Image (cartoon, grey):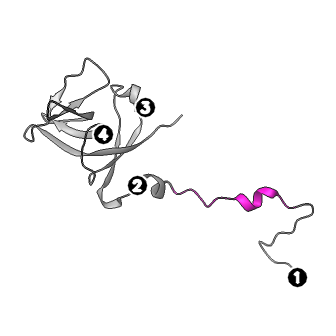
Amino acid sequence: MFLPGARSSAGFPSPADDYLEKTLDLNELLISNKVATFFMRVEGDSLKPSGIRHGDMLIVDRSINATHGKIVVAVVSGELVIRRVESRDGQLVLTSDDASVKHEVIDGEEIQIWGVATSSVHVL
């Protein structure tokens, strides 16, 4: 009797058969809070030394607090930017790996944090 999808080994079974992993779900791997997550395409190379390059896709979570060392998406004077948060002299400051980019103090009025970047997807 023919069984569609049934397999029969004509030789020794592969030792790797016992070590097969489950399928890879990128949503499960990269997104911890679906309702608070959005994606953003990176323009520019100001964070290239941190591994974030022009054309990368950032995964951003709005539910994570912007603390020292986190990379965030923020609105600065009406412009959407990607910067690192640093704590300096008791204040939170937005910085960049590019020394020519002006540092901005997070004061709550002119700067709004939209979310914290959790991953960067880079196509080779």
Left or right: where 29 falls relative to 68: right
Q: Is residue 33 above or below residue 100?
A: below
Disc 3 crowd rating (10 Å Cα; few below 14, some 14-19, many 20+) is few
Spatial distance from mark 2 to mark 4, Cα to Cα? 16 Å
Q: Earlier in the sequence, mark 3 or mark 4?
A: 3
Look at the numbered disc 3 and give the secondary structure of its residue: loop
Spatial distance from mark 1 to mark 2, Cα to Cα? 46 Å
Q: Earlier in the sequence, mark 1 or mark 2?
A: 1
Residue behind mark 4: 70
Residue behind mark 1: 1
State the image coordinates of residue 35 (x, y, percent, origin top left).
31, 61
Q: Earlier in the sequence, mark 2 or mark 3?
A: 2
Numbered-mark total = 4
Which residue is more in the foreground, 102 or 44?
A: 102
Q: Is residue 14 above or below residue 95?
A: below
State the image coordinates of residue 14 (x, y, percent, origin top left).
83, 58
Q: Amino acid at mark 2?
A: Ile
Based on the picture, tell me whether residue 91 belongs to the magenta stretch.
no
Left or right: where 75 falls relative to 24: left
Left or right: where 44 falls relative to 115: right
Residue behind mark 2: 31
Q: Which residues are magenta?
A: 13-25
- Tell me the number on the disc at residue 95: none
Disc 1 crowd rating (10 Å Cα; few below 14, some 14-19, many 20+) is few
Look at the numbered disc 1 and give the secondary structure of its residue: loop
Which residue, as the protein is rendered here, is positioned at the far bottom? 1
Q: Mark 1, mark 4: which one is toward the viewer?
A: 4
Q: Mark 1, mark 3: which one is toward the viewer?
A: 3
Disc 2 crowd rating (10 Å Cα; few below 14, some 14-19, many 20+) is some
- The dominant secondary structure in magenta is loop
Quadrant of the frame with the C terminus: top right
Look at the numbered disc 2 and give the secondary structure of its residue: loop
